[in-house]
């Protein structure tokens, strides 16, 4: 939201109250309290004007919170984002004549307390300024535009807290959730407000009020409601952050590298757990509005087996339940007369894991709706009536997850499905959450619950899987998220069109989400809306099977490969088997996500922040630390990609995993690929574990077929072998001989070394 019109004026009806003076300083063990006022020229300036109370607190090493409050009398009904690992044992607070400094670790916050010269500098250990506040950058905005002038002592008006953080020359901003526009957010106006808007708009399913920059820090805006960010789109030297509230808190996180920032951010907000091994295989769905029954589903699964395409998970989308009754959590008896028996056969005879679609909405026609109404399990309006709407399902209401009894009630139906054999729930929606005239069971603020609701929804479902199957044995497939959502994977990108442009925007969304600590991500292979052409389907298959998780899904058309052409079957077979072979490598990538918050699918900037050429790359990515992937986004098969350079890699060449070609770092390449190929490059002086003998991701990969793939090797290296539960099960050491050949040493394993590009 913009509160200025250029440097000198403000819109009519906006009354800015800028802080310009530190009136009072009160140090404490963990930080300092400031009372800020406008610029004061005499004692009379203390009359008829507001103050802003600021609490600066060191939360952990390299982590400092800044909270500005106008009026403290507002009822704080919540919710807000929980923080973990708070440690104030090493805080330093130093008060001097004209400044006060709060420091913890390598990050310090220095406040200029000289009269009428309020300013703040966030500094690293070398006194390099990261960001801070300068002239007119902390304030309270009175918005009188909707309330015409009236006589009287009081008048109603909107009020916004705003804090404007400086951006330096060449500073770039990343993150802020799964956003489908450019990877670099400079110049954008961003509202952190979850919406169901597809992938081709500025709206987002997963708004995360966290960003990081290429200047060694990140910022978490700790507010669950609507947050407006003007990223160099109002003041070209600042990020202007505002909320319609009396208080605003942000947290600065210092890190020597972007990965270091993510590690500290996820230490505060939660780390991704480890998904089950079977989830890395290929998922197939019924699609959305297509016609299907037992015969259809069985024919699809048998078709994959006949074509030698490994299939791990079958997903039943919305119409597994009867129309107008979502959700009743009962299979449509006309289509699935014996659901428990059928699911059992799919698991035992077809070796399929089962996923079913759900959401948190209960249609009026569902038998559960009356139960929910009588039990008080549904979200209500202020007058006590149940909230209802006809958008999506007729007369539908929302489960009130702030009510513990409602959670148990909802979970009881999911538990029955798990008992039938379901091991994954697609937790769809969670964005269309009303916030006006709404009353929650626990008194939560509806304007905050709009973004926060999905966290309670997904947590409720995750608890069922954890309690019934055990930790990391089942998983979600979620669309909406907020801060903390990374602790309940897997997430997918939502409704995209069946075009190359939508394929590219999906990748941008996944890269941005990964920069907010989300470890695992998928997208609708082939696109959701429309019928993809055979070329788009095959290119999306390549991209999809080189993502952390892979699902074929559409809206009104199926995504089985044989309806496109015979080559589509060949492409899907090849890349499904390639991904399964890389499961040993992906398990290690997942362990890194779990331990450090580093996403499996990551932008090159995250791994190579010193290479300026990587800063804006959003049409290629790294799958884990050691594989560079450049999807093909053109019908003619042409692809352009950049190979990063890094002194730690010795500036040696990368090597094509599929073609064995050498690619020099620091250069751009333009190639043309058929549908059985695309650029997949192996990083120099790194090893990639794989096993082409395993047929399913949950199989034991430690036996026959285990090998390390390498490119250019100039030094001896070690690689840890991790299982699906994040346990280190062995270490492989590779030595480089005088002839350049790589020899492998291991502990009791039959393992080979294979140069990238050589046929298996």
Image (cartoon, grey):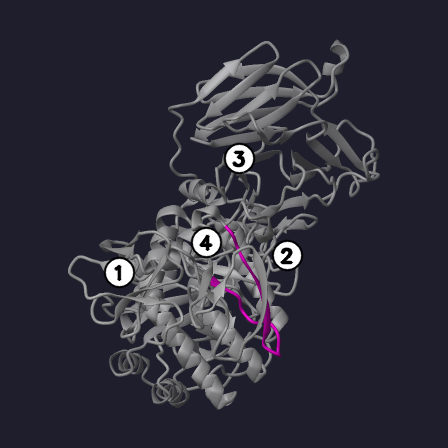
> Cα distance, mark 3 to mark 2?
24 Å
Which mark, by number, is residue 252? 3
Of mark 3 and mark 4, the one earlier in the sequence is: 3
Dot placed on the residue nearer the N-terminal end, 1 or 4? 4
Q: Residue at x 27, y 79 (%)?
A: 344
Tag 4 residue: 518
Q: Give the range drawn in magenta.
A: 628-645
Give the structural element (helix, strand or loop) at label 2.
loop
Task: Specify whether 584 is left or right of 131.
Answer: left
Secondary structure at badge 3 equals strand
Q: Residue at x 40, y 33 (%)?
A: 86
**Towards the viewer: 192 or 725:** 725
Quadrant in which the N terminus appears: top right
Q: Is 84 positioned to the left or the right of 237 in the image?
A: left
Q: Position of residue 289 (x, y in %)?
A: 53, 80
Q: Which of 482 and 737 is in front in this view?
A: 737
- Whole-number angstrom distance, CA of label 1 to CA of label 4: 36 Å
**Left or right of 474 in this view: 503:** right
* Placement of 638 over or under 170, stated as above or below: below
Residue matched to label 2: 182
Q: Quadrant of residue 573?
A: bottom left
| Label 3, residues with CA under 10 Å away: few <14, some 14-19, many ≥20 | many
Q: In the image, which disc is placed on residue 743?
A: 1
Q: Is residue 742 above or below residue 214?
A: below
User: Marks 4/2: CA distance?
Assistant: 18 Å
* Separation (CA) of disc 3 from disc 4: 19 Å
């Amino acid at each position: 939201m913009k509160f200025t019109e250029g440097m000198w004026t403000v819109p009519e009806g906006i009354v800015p109250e800028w802080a310009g003076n530190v009136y009072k300083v009160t140090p404490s063990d963990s930080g300092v309290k400031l009372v800020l006022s406008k610029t004061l020229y005499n004692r009379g300036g203390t009359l008829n004007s507001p103050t802003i109370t600021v609490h600066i607190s060191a939360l952990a090493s390299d982590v400092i919170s800044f909270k500005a409050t106008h009026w403290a009398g507002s009822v704080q009904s919540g919710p807000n984002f929980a923080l973990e690992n708070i440690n104030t044992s090493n805080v330093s607070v130093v008060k001097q004549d004209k400044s006060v400094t709060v420091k913890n670790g390598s990050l310090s916050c220095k406040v200029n307390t000289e009269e009428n010269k309020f300013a703040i500098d966030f500094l690293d250990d070398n006194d390099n300024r990261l960001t801070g506040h300068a002239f007119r950058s902390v304030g309270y905005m009175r918005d009188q535009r909707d309330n015409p002038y009236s006589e009287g002592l009081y008048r109603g008006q909107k009020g916004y807290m705003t804090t404007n953080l400086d951006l330096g020359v060449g500073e770039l901003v990343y993150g802020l959730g799964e956003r489908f526009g450019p990877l670099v957010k400079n110049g954008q106006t961003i509202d952190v407000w979850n919406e169901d808007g597809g992938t081709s708009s500025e709206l987002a399913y997963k708004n995360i009020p966290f960003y990081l920059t290429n200047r060694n820090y990140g910022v978490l805006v700790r507010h669950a409601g609507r947050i407006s960010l003007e990223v160099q789109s109002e003041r070209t030297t600042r990020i202007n952050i505002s909320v319609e509230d009396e208080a605003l808190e942000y947290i600065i996180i210092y890190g020597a590298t972007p990965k270091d920032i993510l590690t500290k951010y996820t230490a505060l907000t939660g780390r991704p757990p480890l998904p089950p091994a079977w989830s890395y295989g290929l998922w197939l769905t019924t699609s959305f509005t297509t016609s299907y029954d037992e015969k259809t589903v069985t024919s699809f699964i048998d078709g994959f087996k006949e074509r030698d395409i490994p299939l791990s998970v079958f997903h039943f989308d919305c119409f597994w339940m009867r129309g107008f009754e979502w959700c009743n959590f009962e299979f449509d008896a006309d289509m699935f007369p014996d659901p428990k028996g059928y699911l059992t056969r799919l698991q035992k005879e077809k070796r399929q894991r089962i996923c079913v679609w759900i959401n948190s909405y209960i249609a009026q026609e569902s038998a559960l709706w009356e139960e929910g109404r009588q039990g008080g399990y549904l979200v209500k309006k202020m007058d006590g009536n149940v909230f209802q709407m006809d958008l999506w399902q007729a007369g539908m209401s929302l489960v009130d997850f702030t009510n513990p009894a409602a959670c148990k009630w909802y979970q009881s139906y999911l538990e029955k499905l798990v008992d039938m054999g379901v091991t994954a729930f697609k937790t769809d929606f969670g964005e269309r959450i009303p916030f006006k005239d709404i009353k929650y069971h626990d008194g939560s603020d509806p304007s905050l619950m709009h973004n926060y609701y999905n966290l309670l929804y997904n947590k409720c479902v995750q608890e069922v899987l954890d309690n019934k199957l055990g930790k990391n044995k089942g998983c979600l497939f979620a669309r909406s998220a907020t801060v903390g959502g990374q602790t309940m994977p897997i997430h997918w990108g939502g409704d995209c069109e069946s075009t190359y442009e939508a394929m590219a925007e999906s990748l941008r969304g996944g890269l941005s989400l990964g920069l907010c600590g989300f470890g695992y991500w998928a997208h609708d292979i082939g696109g959701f809306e429309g019928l993809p052409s055979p070329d788009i389907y095959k290119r999306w298959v390549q991209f999809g099977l080189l993502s952390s998780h892979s699902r074929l899904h559409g809206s009104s058309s199926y995504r089985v490969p044989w309806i496109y052409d015979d080559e589509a079957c060949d492409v899907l077979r090849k890349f499904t088997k390639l991904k399964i072979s890389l499961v040993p490598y992906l398990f290690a990538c997942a362990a890194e996500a779990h331990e450090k918050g580093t996403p499996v699918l990551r932008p090159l900037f995250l791994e190579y922040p010193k290479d300026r050429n990587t800063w804006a790359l959003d049409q290629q990515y790294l799958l884990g630390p050691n594989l560079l992937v450049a999807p093909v986004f053109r019908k003619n098969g042409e692809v352009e990609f950049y190979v990063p350079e890094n002194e730690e890699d010795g500036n040696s060449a990368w090597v094509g995993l599929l073609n064995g070609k050498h690619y020099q770092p620091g250069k751009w390449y333009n190639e043309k690929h058929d549908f059985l190929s695309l650029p997949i490059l192996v990083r120099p002086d790194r090893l990639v574990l794989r096993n082409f003998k395993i047929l399913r991701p949950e199989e034991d990969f430690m036996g026959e077929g285990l090998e390390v793939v390498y490119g250019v090797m100039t030094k001896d290296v070690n690689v840890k072998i991790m299982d699906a539960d994040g346990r280190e099960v062995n270490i492989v050491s590779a030595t480089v001989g005088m002839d350049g050949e790589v020899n492998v040493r291991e502990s009791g394993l039959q393992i080979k070394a294979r140069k990238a590009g050589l046929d298996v």
